[in-house]
């Protein structure tokens, strides 16, 4: 009787564990853009998350072959109840979205689970009962693989469904007479330029814009199918990329007439592998434009400047060699003032914005250059530019009494980190950097994080690092650059780091730069 009690409890615990495992792994697969290769790489880099699964498999083998029924039932029950507590109860930073695709995968996963259960029933009939435990435990131990198997099984169906959605979006764009598509890409700054340009142009025209960071093929397709109106004059389409060919895939869908390349730098090196691949991919946008289309380039980006295309283009930036360039930049805790100059006409107009630092000025100047070429006079843009709000988590100023938080949590690339430190350097109070470092930089990650630490040493009064292993190169770079070890603190999590930053004693105004926030799959 006791045996069956433990068996029932173990099955209930197993069902609960299966549910938690399915949700957790499906969330990670979603963050890894439904690519099994990236999911497998993530699992390989997170052995600690799957150590309980390995222990569970060992439990099953050990107690099935060497223990009595009560002992192995207790062991299995203990491990089943312990795993959920340790593994899955952490609040995600990016919400798990149960899309139609996820629902279809859950159905496939459920069918596979049912087949495993059916196998257990067969074993119950024809084999000793202890082998039921073996099937239960071993299936549970390797259950994370079931998510990738479900993804593989569903792939032909998903491709077919996506193809229908893409063709429907293409049809809608073809029927939208008078709509001009402006593609916007870059290693960093693309989301900011998109929102700044939307703020300016929507004051004069009907504008469709991809929301938030909707910059993947299906994100763009969803925007078109759900939000495109007959009155829309411009479509500002953000284009993201993590692999060579990603931008071309997007241009083949929307066929942009004009394009903006905001920057090219070291980002997603884990998947791009080389900066040359990044350059080639970003310029896929330029290759897709018609001969009479307008191409806008950030002339301050070295990788853009050294790879100018063989076609007509307009440059923008702070450097005086650009077609549109900002000058006389003045930064305060309330924002930034600057002058935009047009090299071809000699026109100059003074602007003010709530944005902080030169990076914001470059992006706004880019938006002004685009809008001006589409017929909006510079002096008519003064009010829309003043209305521009910082994009959340991108050098966003948050004032809390005597503390100003500079929220740059969405930044995770070397150039963006340098720009954020430059913005922090312009602030006149006590400067604190709080960061977990940069990721997705492949074999260059440690070197670039070390350089980040070295630059931070020359700017910051305190450096607070989140996570010892991830941030070790930053600490090394800072200390080698002469930073006071007593002013460097390593926290185990963001809450501890923020509490330490808020507790720092100073008579000056405190500026806390939140630089990057690791996603849930890190």
Image (cartoon, grey):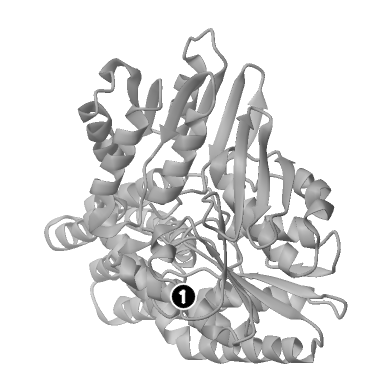
Quick check: 435 above or below 56?
A: above
- Give the quarter of the figure containing the N terminus: bottom left
Residue 165 picture quarter: bottom right
Judging depth in this view, the residue of 264 and 46 nearest the camera is 264
- Which residue was labeled with disc 1? 283
Give the secondary structure at mark 1.
Answer: loop
Residue 41 point in image, percent of width and height = 29, 65
Judging depth in this view, the residue of 136 and 467 nearest the camera is 467
Q: How many marks?
A: 1
Quick check: 462 above or below 3?
A: above
Residue 51 appears left or right of 80: left
Judging depth in this view, the residue of 279 and 101 nearest the camera is 279
Residue 475 picture quarter: top left
Please give the name of the residue rendered at 63% of the width and 87% of the height, measured from the top-left corner. 166
Residue 369 point in image, percent of width and height = 67, 61
Please give the name of the residue rendered at 32% of the width and 56% of the height, measured from the top-left corner. 441
């Amino acid at each position: 009787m006791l045996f069956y009690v433990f068996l029932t409890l173990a099955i209930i615990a197993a069902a609960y564990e299966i549910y938690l495992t399915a949700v957790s792994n499906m969330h990670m697969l979603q963050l890894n853009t439904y690519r099994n290769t990236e999911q497998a790489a993530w699992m390989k880099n997170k052995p600690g998350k799957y150590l309980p699964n390995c222990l569970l498999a060992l439990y099953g083998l050990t107690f099935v072959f060497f223990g009595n029924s009560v002992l192995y039932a207790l062991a299995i029950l203990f491990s089943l109840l312990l795993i959920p507590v340790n593994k899955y109860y952490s609040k995600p930073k990016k919400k798990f979205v149960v899309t139609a695709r996820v629902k279809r995968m859950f159905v496939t996963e459920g069918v596979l689970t049912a087949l495993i259960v059916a196998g257990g029933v067969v074993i119950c009939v024809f084999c000793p009962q202890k082998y039921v435990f073996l099937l239960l435990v071993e299936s549970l131990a390797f259950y994370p693989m079931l998510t990738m198997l479900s993804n593989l099984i569903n792939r032909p169906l998903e491709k077919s469904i996506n193809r229908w959605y893409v063709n429907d979006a293409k049809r809608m764009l073809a029927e939208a007479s008078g709509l001009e598509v402006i593609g916007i890409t870059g290693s960093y700054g693309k989301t900011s330029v998109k929102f700044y340009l939307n703020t300016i142009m929507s004051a004069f025209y009907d504008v469709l814009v991809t929301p938030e960071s909707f910059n993947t093929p299906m994100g763009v397709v969803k925007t078109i199918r759900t939000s495109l109106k007959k009155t829309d004059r411009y479509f500002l389409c953000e284009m993201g990329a993590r692999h060579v060919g990603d931008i071309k895939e997007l241009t083949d869908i929307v066929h942009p007439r004009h394009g903006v390349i905001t920057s090219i730098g070291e980002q997603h090196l884990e998947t791009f592998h080389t900066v040359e691949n990044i350059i080639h991919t970003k310029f896929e946008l330029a290759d897709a434009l018609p001969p009479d289309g307008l191409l806008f380039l950030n002339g301050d980006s070295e990788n853009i400047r050294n790879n100018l295309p063989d076609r007509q283009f307009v440059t923008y930036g702070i450097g005086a060699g650009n077609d549109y360039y900002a000058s006389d930049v003045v930064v305060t805790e309330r924002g930034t003032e600057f002058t935009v100059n047009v090299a071809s006409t000699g026109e100059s107009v003074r602007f003010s914005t709530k944005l902080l630092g030169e990076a914001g000025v470059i992006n706004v100047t880019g938006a002004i250059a685009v809008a001006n070429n589409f017929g909006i006079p510079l002096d008519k843009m003064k009010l829309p530019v003043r209305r521009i709000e910082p994009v959340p988590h991108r050098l966003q100023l948050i004032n809390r009494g005597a503390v100003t938080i500079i929220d740059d949590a969405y930044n995770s690339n070397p150039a963006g980190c340098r720009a954020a430190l430059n913005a922090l350097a312009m602030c006149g109070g006590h400067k604190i950097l709080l960061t977990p470092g940069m990721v997705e930089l492949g074999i260059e990650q440690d070197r670039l994080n070390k350089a980040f630490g070295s630059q931070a040493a020359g700017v910051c009064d305190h450096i607070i690092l989140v996570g010892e292993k991830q941030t070790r190169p930053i600490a090394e770079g800072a200390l080698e650059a002469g930073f006071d070890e007593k002013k460097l603190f390593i926290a185990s999590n963001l809450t501890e780091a923020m509490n330490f930053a808020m507790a720092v004693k100073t008579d000056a105004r405190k500026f806390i730069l939140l630089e990057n926030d690791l996603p849930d799959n890190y």
